[in-house]
Amino acid sequence: MKTLNLISVLFVGAALTLGLAGCKHGPVTTTPIPGANQPTPPPPPPSSRDNGLPPGAMEPTAPPVVVSTNGQIPFDTTGSNPWAGPLKDGVEDKTTLKADTVYFDFDSSTIKKTEDKKLEDVATYLKGHMADALRVEGNCDERGTEKYNLSLGERRALAVREYLANLGVDSRQVTTVSYGKAKPAVEGHNEAAWSKNRRDDFVLLVPKTP
């Protein structure tokens, strides 16, 4: 019996010795805890599903914004003209386009249908003579104040300039002036005379021949 007890004690002691030796010299490892001391990954990019597109589809590029001007042409109302043609040294020609004089209704700057063909002819001429410039002279009949008629004559001249620009004429090629009621084409105090004075005259400015 004593022999068995001694063997048991020796066996237990040897096991303890081997266990201590294994703890001392064996590799020490730890099992990581998910999420503990780990760097936070960056958030994923937004899914195309958020925009109603299939996975992997590219977001479409928005088209450029087009601002409509409704056919309006910006006008220089300061009296200056950027046209580099014969405005400075040109010769005035009042006869070539005289037959195309545009007439207006009373107190109106609206271009009448009857005048369309005249303006088409003027546009054709200017586009075929790019060295020439055109001065549009707005006029009124004798009724109304001087200030009002100067304003109305300006509107009439600008209306023609815009019309020509919309027909393809370079708007820099055309300048405008208003004479109000100061230059009647026909003297008189009746509708027959007034109808001839509510008009836009065309004066060509032609380069001097050397």
Image (cartoon, grey):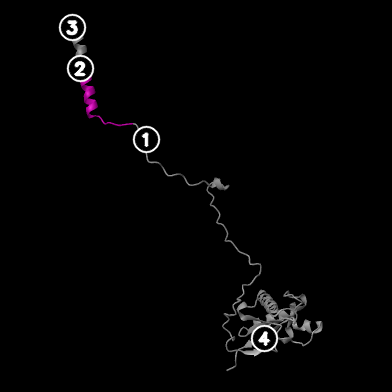
SS at circle 3: helix
- The residue carrying mark 4 is 203
x, y percent for residue 5: 20, 9
**Which one is earlier in the sequence, the residue at label 2 or at label 3?**
3
- The residue carrying mark 2 is 13
Work out whether residue 110 or residue 114 is closer to the camera in this orientation and state it: 110
Amino acid carrying label 3: it is Lys
Position of residue 15 in the picture relative to residue 115 (left or right) = left
Amino acid carrying label 1: it is Ala
x, y percent for residue 105: 77, 77
Which secondary structure class fits the magenta region best?
Answer: helix
| Residue pictured at 20% horizontal, 12% vertical | 7
| Residue pictured at 54% horizontal, 52% vertical | 59
Q: Is 17 included in the stretch rendered in magenta? A: yes
x, y percent for residue 134: 64, 83
Q: Residues within 10 Å of mark 3 (few under 14, many from 20)?
A: few
Amino acid carrying label 4: it is Val
**Which one is earlier in the sequence, the residue at label 4 or at label 1?**
1
Q: Residues within 10 Å of mark 2 (few under 14, many from 20)?
A: few
Q: Is 29 included in the stretch rendered in magenta? A: yes
- The residue carrying mark 3 is 2
| Residue pictured at 67% horizontal, 86% vertical | 203
- The residue carrying mark 1 is 36
- Alpha-carbon span between mark 1 and mark 2: 40 Å
Q: Are marks 1 and 2 in contact (CB under 8 Å)?
A: no
Q: State which region is magenta.
A: 15-30
- Alpha-carbon span between mark 2 and mark 4: 128 Å
SS at circle 4: strand
Q: Residues within 10 Å of mark 1 (few under 14, many from 20)?
A: few
